[in-house]
Image (spheres, helix red, strand yellow):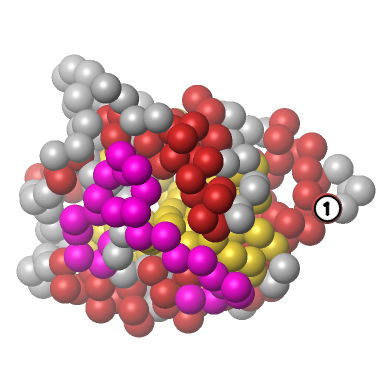
Amino acid sequence: MKPDVSAMAKFITYRTGFRGGTAVILGSGLGSFADQLADPVVLPYGDIPDYPRSTVAGHSGELVAGNLRGNPLIVAKGRFHFYEGYDYHTVTLPIRLFRELGVSNLIITNAAGSMKPETPPGNLMLIKGHMDCTFRHGVELPRRFTGHPYHNPGLLKLAKTAAGRAAVPLGEGIYCWVFGPAYETPAEISFFRELGGDAVGMSTVPEILSAAECGIPTLAISTLTNYAAGISDKPLTHEEVLETANRVKSSFIRLLTEIVVLINAGEDSQTGKRDLLKRDS
């Protein structure tokens, strides 16, 4: 029996008062952004009827509703992965829930491994495109997807403006999705680089695909927390991921805050920005 997303949404609205706005999904070690919300209402995943649990370190498993500089926001501190034993429908459940909650724009974040020696850990990367490198549908080479309907051009442009205002360096690149939980081999990373990949991780793409199906304009950002296998001689550990995420949290918070403010300014203005975001979705 599939979870009743409508009932979940009604429960969350009753408990938090959230009635639409921007949603943010926070990746490993990035939960401190939620601490910036004013008048926060914290709702553990375990309190939501039939809602899955997040089991990974760095994912606290909470929804936090509040406002950021007067802008309504709901934040998911933790996500679900295939390697936790969840199926695709469960991994993407939060996106369908956000649609039911009236979310008008979605920001997805993650911790990812850099596949470019010139882009070391500690950098932020705007995801301008993605590749599904799980081979879950067959042996065909992964395709690169950019632009409509997955990566909203209006939000990509807005994020670059926000980075300038926040004085936060922001690169851009192609994100490669793998199943995990084991880190990739050097041979796999070499293969992904040949395909045009810039960063690799174990999440995000299912959420992007689901958001496109739900018609929610989406922006995705990676915090590059480590070098991918074979790029550096340093062993890969989840501890390094969390340590690097903590080190760059100030820049990460400034960037996301500015993005949320600009999204809301566009939606509330008469300049046509709201229509741009929707049309490009």
Check if residue 56 falls in the magenta segment: yes
Q: Which residue is mark 1?
A: 268
**Residue 216 appears at what percent x and percent y?**
58, 36
Residue at 19% across, 26% down: 135
Residue at 31% across, 25% down: 2
Give, as a single range, the part of the protein colored magenta: 35-59
Residue at 78% across, 52% down: 266
Residue at 55% across, 50% down: 14
Asked which quadrant contains residue 144, the reply is top left
Q: Residues within 10 Å of mark 1 (few under 14, many from 20)?
A: few
Asked which quadrant contains residue 264, the reply is bottom right
**Residue 179 appears at what percent x and percent y?**
18, 40
In this orientation, which residue lies closer to the viewer: 104 or 165? 104
Residue type indicated by callout 1:
Asp
In the image, residue 121 sits, relative to residue 100, either above or below, namely: below
**Residue 162 appears at what percent x and percent y?**
66, 65
Q: Disc 1 on helix, strand or loop?
A: helix
**Residue 217 appears at what percent x and percent y?**
60, 39
In this orientation, which residue lies closer to the viewer: 196 or 166? 166
